[in-house]
Image (tube, grey):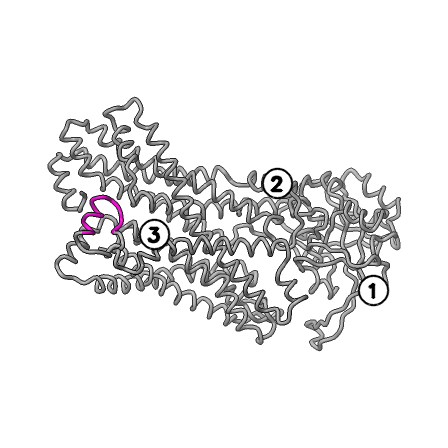
Amino acid sequence: MNGGPMRWAAGIVLALGAGVGSAMGGPVWTSFGQWTGGDLEWLVWIMALLFYGIPGLIITGVLATAFLRLGLVGERDAIMTRMALGERRGEIVRAAARGGATTGLAASAVGVPVGMVIAQVTDSGALMSSRNFPDDPSVQWGAIAWSVAVAVGFTAVGAMVHAIAFAAVTRGTPDAMAAASAAGTEVPYSTAEPVRRWHRVARTVPVAAFVFGMAIVILNRAVPLDAWAMEHLSPAGWLMVTKNVGLTLAVVGGTWCGYHLLGWAARRLVRVASAILGRGDATGGRAFAADGLARPTETRRRSLAITGTIMTLWVWAVAASGAEEAELAAALALDADAIVTSVDPWAGTGVPTGLTQFGLDQDVIDALTQDPDLRVIPARILVEDDTSMWFSSNLDPDERELMYQPFSLAITREDADVVAPDAFRQLGLSPGVRLTGRDTEYLRDYEWVEVACCSTGVSTVNTWIGASPVYSLWAQAPMTSVDGAWAREVWGDAPVSALLVFGAGGPDEQFGMPRSSVIAAVEEAVPEGSGFVLTADASTGWMSFTNDGLAMIIGVFGAVVAVVLSAGVASASARSRRRELATFAALGASPRSLRAAPVWEAVVVSVAAVLAGTVLGAALAVTLGNPFVLTPGAPFDLSEIAWHMGRDLAAVPWLGVLGGAALVTTASALVAWLLGRGMAMGTPVDELRTADREGVR
């Protein structure tokens, strides 16, 4: 009595959660961390637990519990018999908890090392990498401690979900359990138990949590609460914590609501399919399948919801990967071989602000734009006010004040589309948006770019007209960029003061590797004193891989879980109808119809769950991945929102999604066919005896 194949599925879900959680901790051996001091480490851990740890444990635990509940449906008669013979409910639950702890420990032993390896391979720095060691990689003890905490947490979750699942199926007296087993439902709570009075109220708690969380999300979208709190409140911490709690509630409550929404949608699809399936087939397999599908059961309700949830997560990961591929392709298309400017980017200070009026010589512009071997994007340079920050470098560890003038390239999307159609729009360039760029590759040995190139969120552009609000969006643009039309509307017209120069061929697959022929042509066209040429040093070339570690874990494990689940559901469904099909056989049903009935039923259930999960997963991917929908402080432009949603939908690898859906459906159909074949080969008496042994009523 352990839940059968569904226990394996629950273990895979726990391993998936452990892998994702461990990967979030960051690489164990690296030179890059998120925090340079130790004073805030305790706050980092609290925020990580609230925003990542606890929601992850809850979501994984809910899915694993649902798997186990599904697997225990066929074992309720055995549990009922044990309790009737005197075994206490507490003993069964405690034994299940011990077994669950073992399962959680085994899942952590698999998932945590995989997550640590992926974090190490990507080496992008993460939340728990709490120390910076420039040019001196060291062991990140925070990441190790986080992985240990993840393993302990998922071991505890394994024990809890097994205890909860077995407590649910052992509730009530043996007689009540027998009646529920025969009806395919759950044992109701006793009217004498206080939980009965709170049962309906408890069901509204996740909905209320989701509504409250979404209200916080929408409010934070309109007014970034962290920045507002820092500016208007003292202390500001309580509002920031409230915001993070609200985001957590939105995730947890949204998961619960999504689970039930998927179950509801899939059941409606099954109901429609069952009404169509039996037409014109009065005594065949389709009619028998339609008859079974028309009778709702608790097992089918859970299986539809779980399969739909897994498909949602899988499609979400696949769709997010497709969007990332599209963004990478756009960034590579904009990887300029050289950038020619009229303003000295190494000047530091003293340059007039706004759109510079110092344009490039027309001879330089003509020479580059008329070269048939070159492609050129014109731009204007936006210079900001002098600013300063305290800075220490590797060569000069003493902290000192650094003065500099930030600048951006004002690029009109229509001009860029001639070279790379829709590439800047794909990265998010629009009025009021500033794309962060790879400034460090073009401005080598210029210290301020190391600390000022990657700011994101709501900020301002400070020039001679004052502070102009702008939203900074992280991207892989060649240089920090703003929309050219918007910039000229704010600061007035200006001559072309920069050119992004590309070779005539298509983009390569590596950033920062300029073509020598392009560099030679640019140096010939730009005489000394007529402009400044920026190129990326060939040694800075780097590859960008889109197979994000977390998405890969979710994709691989999600696909395995979906296949195992669909096969297990088909097996449980076919076995639950063994007595009924044996009765049909005794009444003269043909072996062919008995073989076909479980297959049709499994296919309808799988397709309904897959369809509902695919729709919701794609919708979540294009909504949460859109930079202008829920991102705090981002410009709200319906045309940009719709364009990015359409682009992300087009970037989804639909053939892969279709292949995954076909694999899930085929697995369930194959298992159902094998069981139906076995039933058809036996005699009705043998099948009725087998049904009695398996507890099928």
- First of labels 1, 3 by sequence position: 3
Residue under the image location 70 percent in, 71 percent down? 393
Between circles 1 and 3, the one closer to the viewer is 3
Please tell me which of labels 3 and 2 falls first in the chain.
3
In depth, the one of 513 and 407 nearer the eye is 407
Tell me if 469 is positioned left or right of 106 in this view. Answer: right
Label 2 close to label 1 by CB (< 8 Å) = no
Q: Quadrant of residue 305?
A: top left
Question: In x, y percent, where is residue 527?
Answer: 87, 51
**Residue drawn at point x = 14 percent, y = 28 percent:** 587
Q: Give the residues in magenta.
A: 176-187
Q: Residues within 10 Å of mark 3 (few under 14, many from 20)?
A: some
Label 1 element class: loop
Q: Which residue is mark 3?
A: 66
What residue is disc 1 on? Answer: 349
Is residue 194 visible in this depiction of the protein? yes
Name the residue at the top extreme.
280
Tell me the kind of residue under disc 2.
Ala
Residue 190: horizontal and vertical position, in percent?
Answer: 25, 56
Image coordinates for residue 683, horizontal then vertical, percent: 12, 34
Task: Verify whether residue 435 appears in magenta.
Answer: no
Decide if residue 116 is in sight here. no
Q: CA distance from mark 3 to mark 2?
A: 36 Å
**At 71% across and 40% down in the image, what residue appears?**
417
Q: How many numbered discs?
A: 3
Mark 1, other Cα within 10 Å: few <14 / some 14–19 / many ≥20: some
Q: Amino acid at mark 1?
A: Thr
Residue underneath mark 2: 642
Labels 2 and 1: the sequence-earlier one:
1
Q: Amino acid at mark 3?
A: Ala
